[in-house]
Amino acid sequence: MRRRHGEPRTREEYARGLPDYHDPTGGFGGAAPAYSALTLRIVLASVAIVLSIGGAVLFAFTGVLWGTALLGVLAVGSAIDLAWVIHRKRRGEPG
């Protein structure tokens, strides 16, 4: 059953995933609806955390404090993103 414009979405619609979510060009030119890629974001955030911490440690050993701080902030931001994406995944969103 199709939803009319303006009707609130049901919990089942959110559980299945929303087509064209955050895609302003979704469905344009016959493109298939896009779904969230949460698993890819988990992998990318994990890699960013590991590389940022490794780089921060290297900068700390060489005495480059601005590089240590910059990569430390990047690692914290990636950890926050990772926590949020895991929260969304555990909530039941597909991806």
Image (cartoon, rainbow, N blue to C red):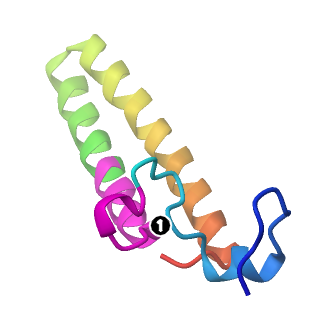
Q: Where is mark 1, residue-wise?
A: 36
Indicate the quadrant where residue 61 lies: top left
Is residue 47 or residue 33 the one in the foreground? 33
Assign a secondary structure to mark 1: loop
Q: Is residue 56 left or right of residue 88?
A: left
Q: Is residue 56 left or right of residue 22?
A: left
Residue type, numbered disc 1: Ser
Is residue 24 or residue 79 the one in the foreground? 24
Residue at horizontal 34 percent and vertical 65 percent from the top? 43
Residue at horizontal 47 percent and vertical 66 percent from the top? 36
Dominant SS of magenta comes to: helix
Residue 82 percent location from the top left of the image: 50, 55
Residue at horizontal 43 percent and vertical 71 percent from the top? 33
Residue at the far bottom in the pictured view: 1
Image height of 49 relative to 86, above or below? above
Q: Is residue 34 magenta?
A: yes
Indicate the quadrant where residue 59 lies: top left
- The magenta segment is 26-48
Residue at the far left in the pictured view: 62
